[in-house]
Structures are given as structure tokens and as C-alpha cells.
């Protein structure tokens, strides 16, 4: 049963593309949410020309271990203004009051849940990441809670166009398969010394890799890809 989760096609959208992108992100990253419309537009306008995969960053291990020196954030309530700012810059709706009403204790559970879906299907995981972001950013659901993660997985299972087995997801969420996949992502993030999300590493044949860190507009990334 080893590598069973890779049966649908590894963990990336592999195409005969000219550009390869690794997207380092986190379900609780407000700047990734601000970037989301630009990212989806990039994928649509460059369909068939790029390949990509996601790498989960583990933005907030716990509030005991979290210290965002750039934004002077060490407590949940201080994250609200950062989210509000990201929403204003990106022109997206964002439920910043969650950091006062029901603050997520960690981003690790949602990262592990994403990897548990990804073990089955890249397409399902891509959709699940969107469901995670919408749940917390738009609806104010605490995606650090297991019941929320399972509810979103049930919603995913109802979307029959995505190959996804709910029972297998529940098992991988607790049997360390999802956790081990997430650990590999964290190791990759540490190897690149990344501490801001979103970060894109863009590779084109015959050229050095380019790194774009932090929120960027469609035009900025599109120019580099072209």
C-alpha cells in the first residue's frame, strides 16, 4: 500500500509545460488569499504551458512558537490588522475578526489535512485548499479544528468529479501518513530558508530559478513567466 496516494498522479499537476512553479503557501496565509485571484488567472491564461505543485509552509506551529517580526505579531489578536491590510491591498474579502472570535491555534492541522487529500489526488487537494481558504477567510471557520476539516472533506467528497475517498482521508489524518507528507514539505521550506508566504520558485528551461516572495500582482508574475 506504500505510495498508494500517488496513484492519481504524484503530487503535482504535470504537463508538458515550459515553466515549472513550486508554490509555497499555507491555508492560514492571508497574503496567499490576496494572491489567489491572480494565481487562478495565471493558471487559466497559461494552461498547458506550466506545471506546478504546492508545498505547505506550516506558518503557525503554535502561538507559543510564533513570532512575526516583520508585522510585530506574537498573539492571535495582533493578526487581525494584518489580515485587514491584506484584504485591502489585494481587494479581497477577509474575515479578520476570527482572530478575536475564534482564533486558530495552529496552521499545522490544515496543512496536514491538505497533504492527506493530496496523497489521493492532486486535483482534489487543489480543490480542498480552496475550500480551506474560503472557510476561514470568508466564513470565519476555525480550520485548526478537526470537525471543520472533516466537514470540508465531506463537502469535497460530494463533488464527484474529484477522485477522493473520505474514509481514507480520515485514516491518513490520524495514522501519520498525512503528517509525514507535511514534514517533508516543512523540511523543503527550511532547506530554502523561507519564512514568508506566498513564495513562488519559478524555473524555465536553460535559465536560473527565480524566486518571488510575498504578495505579487498577476502582471508581475505573468511578466516573469512570459
Image (cartoon, rainbow, N blue to C red):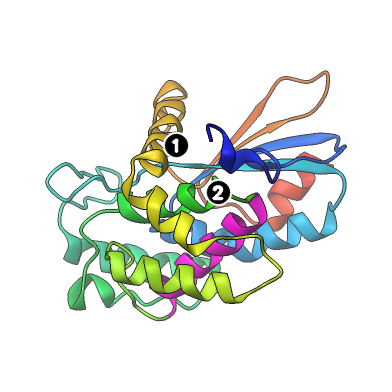
Q: Do the numbered discs 2 and 1 sit on residues whose CB atoms are within 8 Å? A: yes
Between residues 54 and 221, which one lies in front from this camera angle?
A: 54
Coordinates of residue 220 in the picture (x, y in percent): 70, 49
Confirm whether the magenta stretch covers residue 154.
no
Residue 57 falls left or right of residue 108: right
Q: Is residue 172 above or below residue 167?
A: above
Q: Is residue 94 above or below residue 179?
A: below
Label the magenta part by its dominant secondary structure. helix
Residue 118: which numbered mark, if any? 2
Coordinates of residue 151 in the picture (x, y in percent): 40, 74
Q: Is residue 12 above or below residue 102?
A: above
Q: CA distance from mark 2 to mark 1?
A: 9 Å
Q: Which residue is mark 1?
A: 181
Which span is picked out in magenta? 122-138
- Is residue 158 shown to the viewer in this render? yes
Pick out the residue farthest to the left.
Answer: 64
Pick whichever of labels 2 and 1 is earlier in the sequence: 2
Confirm whether the magenta stretch covers residue 127.
yes
Q: Secondary structure at mark 1?
A: helix
Amino acid at each position: 500500500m506504500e505510495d498508494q496516494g500517488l496513484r492519481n498522479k504524484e503530487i503535482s499537476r504535470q504537463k508538458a509545460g515550459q515553466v515549472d512553479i513550486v508554490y509555497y503557501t499555507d491555508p492560514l496565509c492571508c497574503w496567499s488569499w490576496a494572491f489567489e485571484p491572480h494565481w487562478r488567472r495565471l493558471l487559466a491564461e497559461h494552461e498547458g504551458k506550466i506545471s506546478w505543485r504546492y508545498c505547505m509552509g506550516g506558518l503557525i506551529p503554535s502561538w507559543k512558537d510564533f513570532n512575526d517580526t516583520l508585522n510585530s505579531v506574537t498573539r492571535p489578536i495582533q493578526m487581525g490588522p494584518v489580515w485587514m491590510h491584506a484584504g485591502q491591498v489585494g481587494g479581497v474579502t477577509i474575515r479578520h475578526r476570527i482572530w478575536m472570535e475564534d482564533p486558530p491555534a495552529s496552521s499545522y492541522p490544515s496543512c496536514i489535512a491538505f497533504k492527506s487529500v493530496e496523497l489521493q489526488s492532486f486535483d482534489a487537494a487543489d480543490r480542498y485548499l480552496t475550500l480551506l481558504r474560503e472557510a476561514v477567510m470568508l466564513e470565519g471557520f476555525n480550520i485548526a479544528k478537526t470537525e471543520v476539516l472533516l466537514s470540508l472533506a465531506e463537502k469535497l467528497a460530494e463533488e464527484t468529479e474529484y477522485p477522493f475517498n473520505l474514509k481514507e482521508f480520515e485514516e491518513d489524518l490520524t495514522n501519520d501518513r498525512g503528517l509525514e507528507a507535511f514534514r517533508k514539505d516543512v523540511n523543503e521550506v527550511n532547506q530554502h530558508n523561507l519564512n514568508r508566504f506566498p513564495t513562488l520558485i519559478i524555473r524555465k528551461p536553460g535559465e536560473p530559478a527565480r524566486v518571488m516572495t510575498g504578495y505579487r500582482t498577476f502582471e508581475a508574475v505573468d511578466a516573469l513567466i512570459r
